[in-house]
Image (cartoon, helix red, strand yellow):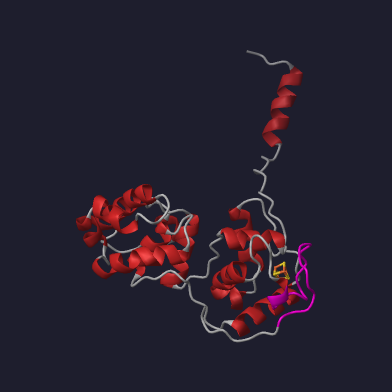
Amino acid sequence: MVLPLCELSYRKLMASKPKTKPAKKRIGRSRYSRDQLVEIFSRFKQQRKEPKGELDHVNAYTLLVAVVLSAQATDVGVNKATKALFAIVDTPEKMVTLGEEELIQHIRTIGLFRNKAKNVILLSKKLISEFDSQVPQNRDTLVTLPGVGRKTANVVVSMAFGQPTIAVDTHIFRLGNRVGLAPGKTTDDVEAILERVIPEEFLYHAHHWLILHGRYICKARKPDCEACIIADLCKSKEKTCDVPAPVIERGAG
Ligand code: SF4
């Protein structure tokens, strides 16, 4: 078949045209300069040199279970329920032996307990069959386990394996947007901005510093700006005070 000249030219043009790359997802920017971020995190560090998570656990496996149970529940509530549980169950094998119905009896004070019990049993079985009963150290592998999302995986790789990640929970999401540290529409956006802008020397503990700041000072309903050690630096429209509270060492919590 003989193609008309204009059709031939069009085909040549299309063949020579560079293929357009898929558009990169644009993520927002922190409202703070690097110097300001260094100052903010230096104060958090001065206040709590070695911050710790508040979920009780005895090893990487029980940490994973505790984090799965903590979705839409308080750490205090989870700790109450897991105290007796982790005294008798600290491996995937023991959890499978305990069984779903017994597990439900231990965790029935925690929201969504039926679904969580089901996931804990399924993830324990998968750990036994596919991972030699060990908790994977890789975030992408962890999210293949039942009931384990990106936030849970981030908490586990950070707390159990010392990898610097930011697990964006409700407190960090609020801080990111309210204070302008990492304005983002989704938790993934906030996570990406924070991991990019937090100076490296602070990245490992940043997750806990931000959670504790959000939980106890920059609270959801009403931020306690008078007690805030970064009140002078904060760019939030909601802040009610410009004078920073003195930095007092508080240990881990
Ligand atoms: S000054 Fe107020 S709004 Fe800003 S971080 Fe502190 S508590 Fe939150």
Tell me residue 207's x, y (percent).
Answer: 56, 69
> Extreme left residue here?
97
Q: Residue at left 72%, top 75%?
A: 226
Where in the figure is residue 94, as x and y percent of width and height? 22, 62
Residue in the picture at 80% in, 75% down: 242
Across and down, in percent, residue 192 comes to 61, 59
The one of 147 and 178 positioned closer to us in this rendering: 178
The foreground one among 20 and 245 is: 245
The image quadrant in which ligand 1 is located: bottom right
Q: Based on the picture, tell me whether residue 244 belongs to the magenta stretch.
A: yes
| Residue 103, x across and y down, in percent | 28, 55
Instruction: Using residue 225 as the reference point, say whether residue 215 is left or right of it.
Output: left
Question: Which residue range is magenta in the image?
Answer: 226-245
Instruction: Please check the rendered image and state whether residue 107 is part of the magenta-colored stretch, yes or no.
Output: no
Q: Is residue 234 left or right of residue 93?
A: right
Judge whether residue 137 can be spotted in this image.
Answer: no
Which is more toward the observer, 246 or 135?
246
Q: Quadrant of residue 27?
A: bottom right
